[in-house]
Image (tube, rainbow, N blue to C red):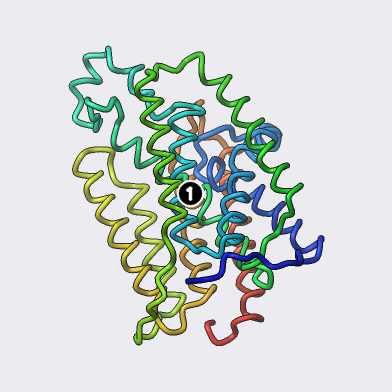
Amino acid sequence: MPSTSAPTALPRFRRRWAAVAGLMVLSPISAEYLIGYGESRPLELLVGLLVLAPLYGSVAVLIREITRRTGRGWPTILLLSAAFGVIQAGLIDQSLFNYEVHAGDPDWANEPQHTLISGLGVDAASLLTYVGGHVIWSFAAPIAVVESCAARIADRRWLGRAGLSAMAALWALGAVLVHLDAAADSTASAVQLSGAALVAAALIAAAFTVWPAHHPSSSRAPSWRLVGTVTGVAWGASQLLPATWLGLTVNVATLVVLGRLLLRWARSQGWGRSHMLAAAGSALVVRAALSFLVEPLAGGTGAVKYAVNAIMLAGVTVLLYLAARRLHREEPSTF
């Protein structure tokens, strides 16, 4: 079992705060902007970061800090990400329970598209989209990419107590602002909110009872190119499958198979940060590429929308290239 003690000395201020700032920005961009369903005007996107960075970025930083400080690994990151996904979608903006807005519409009720679990008052496809989306794109992928950019300090804590307190305060402020904006339109019941809180608490508890597997396999890890290709196909499928029970079943099965495959590969000889970067980077690239097919919620698919999509895709590509170059200096044998 790994030690739970954190390094006594923090890395250099410039290095660690550059990493923190990078994660604060990449997390909300990956969560909200890459897919292209929101506002497309550059000024509004920049202003939106003032709320989204505290709401998403601070959580990504806290999840990473808690995990590294306690000596845990990716199981803890994923479980904490799922917990905050439930908190975000079930308690803060309560989008998980928005099906009530359509429940009185007989046309919607008779459509085969929805996957409503009537006993819970939750649409299963929305549950996977919101919570699963937070796990992959809001937190896990940005953490993996930024740690690749800061490989020398990736296993160390980046913040002291004051920094942790600041992150928690920023998240609370962002959560309150979003909740106040969304609460007026919420139809969630007290039972639904209590259920979401219990699920989040259970996920948090599970995050502190699991440890990464320490039984390495004798098999050889695949190349990072194969990892990126396989994960990219899986991420694309998860975004393109229809929101029907059949589509949801295939989607869940795909993600389960991918998870088991990544777990098996991660225990193989030669697995390193280059493989993690390939898996996480492919998620960002797929999300940015699919934005060209997405119509914004406010409508309109003009030149500005496509220009923003292109800039986002180019930015992700450059970021991954720079991260790979940094890793190449640290792990030349894996490239």
Q: Is residue 110 above or below residue 230?
A: above
**Picture coordinates of residue 122, whole percent (x, y):** 30, 29
Q: At label 1, which amino acid type do we have?
A: Leu
Q: How many marks?
A: 1
Q: Is residue 311 visible?
A: no
Q: Is residue 161 above or below residue 245?
A: below
Q: Is residue 34 left or right of residue 96?
A: right
Q: Tell me which corner region of the image, top left, top right, bottom left or bottom right, holds residue 325.
A: bottom right
Along the line of sight, which residue is nearer the eye, 153 or 5?
5
Q: Is residue 18 above or below residue 105?
A: below
Along the line of sight, which residue is nearer the eye, 128 or 71?
71
- The residue located at (53%, 44%) in the rendering is 31
Q: Tell me which corner region of the image, top left, top right, bottom left or bottom right, holds residue 68.
A: bottom right
Q: Is residue 189 left or right of residue 13?
A: left
Residue that carries the numbered disc 1 in the rendered image = 80
**Picture coordinates of residue 297, whole percent (x, y):** 48, 29
Q: Is residue 190 left or right of residue 252?
A: right
Q: Is residue 111 visible?
A: yes
- The residue located at (22%, 26%) in the rendering is 119
- The residue located at (68%, 37%) in the rendering is 170
> Quick one: SS at disc 1?
helix
Specify few, some or many for label 1: CA neighbours under 10 Å numbering under 14, 14-19, or 20 or more: many
Along the line of sight, which residue is nearer the eye, 191 or 114?
191
Q: Indicate the quadrant containing the C terminus: top left, top right, bottom left or bottom right.
A: bottom right
